[in-house]
Image (cartoon, grey):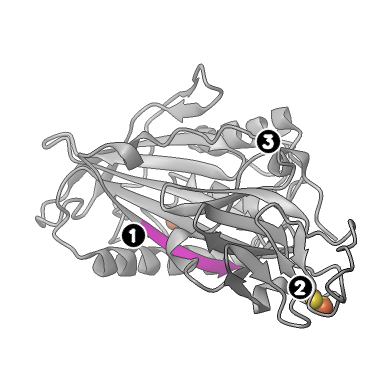
Amino acid sequence: MRLTEKILENDWIVACPAEEVQEEPIQVVILNERVVIFRTDNGVQAFKDLCIHRGAALSLGTVKDNCLVCPYHGWKYDETGDCVEIPQLPEDRAIPTKAKAIKYACKEAYGLIWVNFNNNAPELFDYPEYDDPNYRNIVWGGHVVDAKPPRIIENFLDVGHLAVLHGGYLGDEEHTEIQPYKMNNQEDGSIFSDEIPIFQPDPDGSGVAKDVYYTYGIYRPLAVRFTKRDPDTDHKFTILLLVRPIDENSSMVYGIMSFNYDNQQTDQETKDFQDIIFMQDKPIVENQKPEDLPLDLQVELSLISDRVSIAYRRYLTDKGFTLGTA
Ligand code: FES
Ligand SMILES: [Fe+2]
């Protein structure tokens, strides 16, 4: 049974990187539901990964003539989900009207595939870096994490841990203090922080330690970002972080890394570095208790420097977001 979370079901949920969907259909588990994603001449398509005939997984089948063909008895479903061919039926027999696959809205954007369960045409949030010719974009992940989505998102929004958990990489253990900053509501419903100075040992690869400026942003319950800006060069590096809830206890994490400068690394080197950082975060997040993010701000002890995560918790409360929260 699909996990219920109205906000997500009415929105676009990240399914996988676009490049994972080639000629063969693939299965992606979203909110505990198996979904098959495949490509036709008209773009990407998503169905519930279930054949109504005998319950086979359609993702084990093939794509033929812009249709998805079930591997078990060869029933053929067109892009709308209608069954258009049943090999076992004598030719003069009509196809039963109930022979359909359950279709979900599906689209490709920002180098990723997105699924909308309720087919209600939501607007995808705007990630301007992706369409800006001054930026190079790299899709990162997925990584499976045994944690619930809000804990993973909050870890990404946590400015105080950079100098400690990522000391030597993203911060310096001698510079752990966080200056006061504010969170600002935007007209489109997103929330962005002021720029927050972080002292980093080698922010641009030149070997010179200095302050860089982090701006955190919340677009959606499971779509957040930060931008790191170098004040001397105005070089900007953004990560958009996206989480797909797999089931009750596990999540898939994706990112888009966007650079408006040449970071002197290949895509693979850039992803490898992000993996190193992420592997420092992963055991922390997988072992946090309670697993559900407490939305009652009295339950854990917040500092002023935790304003981004406080804003995130309030945002989830305002939205009535329940998945992985308490
Ligand atoms: S189970 Fe799909 S065609 Fe029989
Ligand atoms: Fe981290």
Q: Position of residue 109 (x, y in %)?
A: 46, 46
The answer to whether residue 284 is visible is yes
Residue at 32% x, 38% y: name it: 131
Q: Position of residue 201 (x, y in %)?
A: 21, 54
Residue for badge 2: 75
Residue for badge 3: 316
Q: Which amino acid, by three-letter code, is at mark 1?
A: Gly
Q: Which amino acid, by three-letter code, is at mark 3?
A: Leu
Residue at 90% x, 61% y: name it: 96
CB at disc 2 and ligand 1 closer than 8 Å = yes
Distance, label 1 to label 2, CA atoms, is: 56 Å
Taking depth in this image into account, of 157 and 30 the one nearest to the observer is: 30
Residue for badge 1: 167
How dense is the environment of label 2, judged by Cα within 10 Å: few (below 14), some, or many (20 and up)? many
Extreme residue in the bottom direction: 72
Front of the two marks 2 and 3: 2
Tell which quarter ligand 1 is in.
bottom right
How dense is the environment of label 1, judged by Cα within 10 Å: few (below 14), some, or many (20 and up)? some
Instruction: Answer with mark 1 or mark 2, whichever residue precedes in sequence.
Output: 2
Q: Secondary structure at mark 2?
A: loop
120 lies left or right of 201: right
User: For residue 202, which numbered disc appears in the image?
Assistant: none
Q: Secondary structure at mark 3?
A: helix
Q: Secondary structure at mark 1?
A: loop
Q: Which amino acid, by three-letter code, is at mark 2?
A: Trp
- Residue 101 lies in the magenta stretch: no
Q: Which residues are magenta?
A: 139-145
Instruction: Answer with mark 3 or mark 1, whichever residue precedes in sequence.
Output: 1
- Residue 141 lies in the magenta stretch: yes
Taking depth in this image into account, of 222 and 128 the one nearest to the observer is: 128
